[in-house]
Image: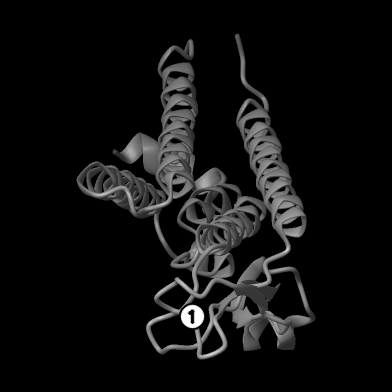
Amino acid sequence: MQATEISRSALDVEWQRLQVVAGNLANINTSRTASGEPFRPLRLVSGPRTGFAGLVAGGLPGGVTVRGVETVQGNARRVYEPAHPHADTEGFVTYPAIDHAGEMTLLIRTARAYEANLTAINIAHQMYARAMQLGHQS
Amino acid sequence: MTGIEAIGAIGPALGAPAITNVGGAAAPVPGTASGTGFAELLTAGMRQVDTKVAEANALVRQFALDDSVPLHQVTFALEEARMAVELAMQVRGRLVESYRELMNMQL
């Protein structure tokens, strides 16, 4: 069941990526975080999951894992809103410069990757079920 | 159980990896299977099936309590448990089939 284990790790990662993108979209109008800094969009960084044993054995694929959640560097969006409670002395409010189209594209890509891994799991289960029928009489 | 033991003597090498791979990590090394009896192998396999079913059960309960558990983990555990049970049933089927075959042998 190694193949399904690999695909399951990818499902976990894509699920978390979806949560990160959803968080970015939810904070698109956030003017300030709890620490006072402007909100920065986040990106989930994933990498291959290879344990020490796997490296020694010769790099068999072991799935994917979350390497961390990093902030995207970029300019903040400054909007002139003097009446806003979070406006600075010049009357500007700092919003995160979230690339809306980019986030939506990433969302769709995440969903497609999730689907692809579900398909891989289904195929693996089909092969498993077929193997169970091996030599089955009547 | 002696009849089953006799059948087990024919193919413990074939039976061992198929059963122990159901559980994945905690599988004994197939090379050492010649020492263990087939009944013990069966028992170990059934215990792993039971573990899988219990895992799926716990995940379903957790999902029902709070849905912070990703849904795919629940369905995956359910599917894995189903597969394990199905494999156990297949093993049992073959076993009973061959036992019956021997019982019906004309002497």
Q: Amino acid at mark 1?
A: Ala
- Please, which chain is the residue tagged with disc 1 on? A
Compared to residue A21, the image places residue A36 above or below, namely below
Q: Nearer the viewer, residue B45 or B76?
A: B76
Q: Where is residue A52 drawn, in percent x and y?
A: 64, 88
Q: Where is residue B4 drawn, in percent x and y?
A: 38, 37
Q: Is B82 on the left or on the right of A106, as rendered?
A: left
Q: Is B54 on the left or on the right of A3, as rendered?
A: left
Residue at image point 67% right, 66% down:
A63
Q: Nearer the viewer, residue B25 or A103?
A: A103
Compared to residue B102, the image places residue A129 above or below, namely below
Count of picture labels: 1
Q: Where is residue B18 drawn, in percent x and y?
A: 56, 48
Q: Quadrant of residue A131?
A: top right
Q: Quadrant of residue B17?
A: bottom right
> What residue sits right under mark 1 in the picture?
A87
The quadrant of the rendering that contains the N terminus of chain B is: top left
Compared to residue A86, the image places residue B99 above or below, namely above
Q: Where is residue B53 drawn, in percent x and y?
A: 32, 43
Residue A87 visible = yes
Label 1 element class:
loop
Q: How is the image coloured?
A: one colour
Residue A49 visible = no
Assess disc 1: are there few (<14), some (14-19) or many (≥20) residues with their C-alpha within 10 Å of its C-alpha.
Answer: some
Q: Nearer the viewer, residue A117 or A27?
A: A27
Compared to residue A64, the image places residue A94 above or below, namely below
Residue at image point 59% right, 78% down:
A40
Residue at image point 54% right, 71% down:
A81
